[in-house]
Image: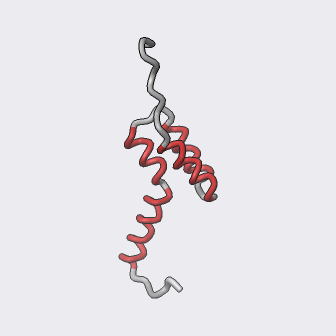
Amino acid sequence: MFGSLGPLIATVLGLLSLIFYLLPSLIAFNRGIENRYLVLVVNIVFGASVIGWLIALYLAARKVKSPLPGTA
């Protein structure tokens, strides 16, 4: 099936797949959220299942709670 792909196309598809797989972690680190390492662990360990990947994406994309006024 994929035997007819050239090495360049196979490399590009592999890199795109890796970027898509690590997308929740990339979002978390880009946003600088507090639990970015938790997102990374969930993404790597459970990301192969769709549920684990969606949980990591939720953790990376949810709105960060802002501190209450006067508590600093």
x, y (%) of residue 54? 57, 53
Q: Is residue 32 left or right of residue 40?
A: left
Name which residue lies at 59% across and 48% down.
55
Colouring used for the render: secondary structure
Q: Is residue 1 left or right of residue 30?
A: right
Name which residue lies at 57% across and 54% down.
53
Q: How many marks?
A: 0
Name which residue lies at 45% across and 13% down.
71
Above/below status of 21 relative to 8: above
x, y (%) of residue 21? 50, 58
Name which residue lies at 47% across and 65% down.
17
Q: Is residue 43 left or right of residue 18?
A: right
x, y (%) of residue 66? 44, 26
The one nearer the camera, 25 or 67, is 67
Using the rendered view, name the quadrant where residue 12 is placed.
Answer: bottom left
The one nearer the camera, 41 or 60, is 60
x, y (%) of residue 47? 58, 54
Quarter containing the C terminus = top left
